Image: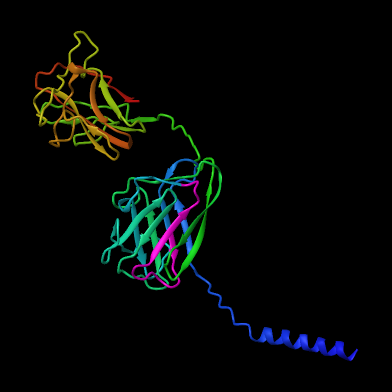
Amino acid sequence: MKRILIRFLTITTILSLMVLFCPPVSVVNAADLSDMSAVLTTLTKNVVADQTILFTTTTGLAADETIILTYESDFSIAAGLDYEDIDLSFDETPDGVCETGDTQMTLAAAPTGATMGVVRTDGSIITFTNGSTAVAGGGEICIQIGTNAAGPGVEQITNPTVVGEYDLAITGTIGAPDSGTIVIAIVDDDSVAVTATVPPSLTFTVTGTALEFGTLSATASRWADASAGNATVVVGTTLEAGTNSTSGYSITINGTTLTSTGTPADTITAMASEATLTPTQEEFGIRITSAGGNGAVDTVYDNSPADSYALVVAAFPDEIAASATQSATTTYSIYYAANIAADTEAHTDYTTTLTYVANGNF
């Protein structure tokens, strides 16, 4: 019994000594990248997309260090993709966005001096090899791939053909080494088709439909209004027109000059187009001003000069205003003026009906 106990104690001692003299094991943990994101212009399966990759490096990017983007093999990097299809920038004060405040790296096929080299290593790997430009620890790095690159970029990366989640690993010697993985979710179709119909619209109102000149004079011009006429310039009719037609609208006038209803049916001469009103001269015409919208008055009837008038009955129905495109409401103010000569036929029933029609160009 005594011999057995001694052997047990001896074995225990040896085992204890073996544990005490084992050399220590060193464990090195890679610094993780942070604030990582990969934004694709589309997540739809089997279509090409631009990519914007953003991350913050804990220890920075030193000269000659590498950044390696490794996609799962279901992604397909275009065979012709090179440094012209890629931008890389950095911001030592991270702001979560590319471009704003960033410093752009100069890229080429191989590193030289401050220029960074970029190589499509194979169909799923892109390798960046830094030149001499360093990024401080805590700096934010942005990588843009595709037509969003300023190259201008042409080649893109094709999304996987099967719906699912796919890894993009960021490794290399960056930060000795910083590393991280971004998960990209691919879907059947990330687009939403939304349709809508905007019905055609044409608005048109006419205000001031019963006008009077009262008694005309051979020595002074007179303007029509809603109550016995006026010796000073006054608006007789107001038109308001607007449309959502991209081809706009037109407004025409039709009718006759002032005509007596008796026998014989005498008329007051319509003005073809005159720069000024002339008392003692028989004449009847209109002029038009416009305000708002895209509508404009035809040059025959517009307010230039201020007292020019016309009533081109020979061309009736005659266009007086139009808009060449869609237009908010345009307000047209129409002035009616008349003069008579000393020998203009006397009647108490000179009258006319002028009709304004608006047509949308749909």
Quadrant occupied by the N terminus: bottom right
What residue do we see at 60% from left, 82% from top? 23
State the residue in front, 26 or 316: 26
Which residue is at the far right? 1
In the rendered image, residue 26, in percent from the top left (x then y), is placed at 56, 78
Magenta run includes residue 262: no
Question: What residue span does the magenta drawing correspond to?
Answer: 54-75
- Quick check: 39 left or right of 205? right
Q: Position of residue 223 (x, y in %)?
A: 21, 31
Does any portion of residue 226 appear in the rendered image? yes
> Which one is nearer the viewer's eye here, 78 or 237?
78
77 vs 351: above or below: below
Relative image position of residue 139 (x, y in whole percent)? 40, 69
User: Is residue 70 located in the magenta-colored stretch of the structure?
Assistant: yes
**Which residue is nearer to you in this view: 112 or 195?**
112
Q: Is residue 13 above or below residue 197?
A: below
Q: Quadrant of the C terminus?
A: top left
- Depicted 80 relative to depicted 295: above or below: below
Q: Is residue 34 visible?
A: no
